[in-house]
Image: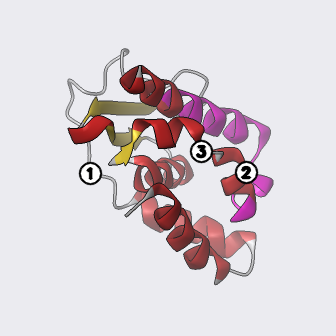
Amino acid sequence: MTLEETAQDIREEFSFLDDWEQRYAHLIDLGKSNLPLTEAERSEENRVRGCASQVWLVSGQGEDNRLTLRAESNAMIVSGLIALLVRLFSGQPAPDIAAFDPAGFLEEIGVSGALTAQRSNGLASMIQRIQSDARAISS
């Protein structure tokens, strides 16, 4: 699936959620699907700076300059946000990730509007890290 096709699937999924409480519950459910990282992967090198919660993001280069992502957080809602980003971006071509507008997408599906300032800053840090990793692969 292309990045846009994955984004469209997520748009449709979130279109059935009428309010923030339903979106919040759905994000928590998404977060439960994250596979745990190893102790070694929960390192300072993999920690996402700018997040109030602990967030670790492991990225790699797959076939055809595709970014692979795995992540973990110690906070339920943040786990859901990172699961959403992993679902959206993992396995996608790095140039497509670097060119995508995740802030607009998250606003469109109704996720970013209800986040606290701290969570919004953390989400922006996660997105920045993913897009930076994607740019590094496509260089």
| Residue 8 against residue 68 in the figure, above or below | below
Give, as a single range, the part of the protein colored magenta: 108-129
| Secondary structure of residue under mark 3 | loop
Which residue carries the number 3 mark? 100
Is label 2 or label 1 in front?
2
Q: CA distance from mark 2 to mark 1?
A: 27 Å
Find residue 122 and report its horizontal and vertical position in percent: 63, 34
Task: Tell me if residue 24 is in the magenta stretch.
Answer: no
Task: Tell me if residue 122 is in the magenta stretch.
Answer: yes
Of mark 2 and mark 1, the one earlier in the sequence is 1
Near mark 2 (Cα within 10 A), the count class, few <14, some 14-19 or many ≥20, is few
Near mark 1 (Cα within 10 A), the count class, few <14, some 14-19 or many ≥20, is few
Q: CA distance from mark 3 to mark 2?
A: 9 Å
Q: Amino acid at mark 2?
A: Gly
Find residue 29 and report its horizontal and vertical position in percent: 45, 67
Q: Amino acid at mark 3?
A: Phe
Find residue 118 and report its horizontal and vertical position in percent: 72, 35
Of mark 1 and mark 3, the one earlier in the sequence is 1
Near mark 3 (Cα within 10 A), the count class, few <14, some 14-19 or many ≥20, is some
Task: Give left or right: position of 113 versus 32.
Answer: right
Task: Give left or right: position of 53 versus 101.
Answer: left
Which residue carries the number 2 mark? 104
Magenta segment, prevailing SS (helix, strand or loop): helix
Q: Amino acid at mark 1?
A: Leu
**Could you tell me which quadrant the N terminus lies in?**
bottom left
Which residue carries the number 1 mark? 35
Applied colour scheme: secondary structure
Find residue 14 and report its horizontal and vertical position in percent: 61, 74
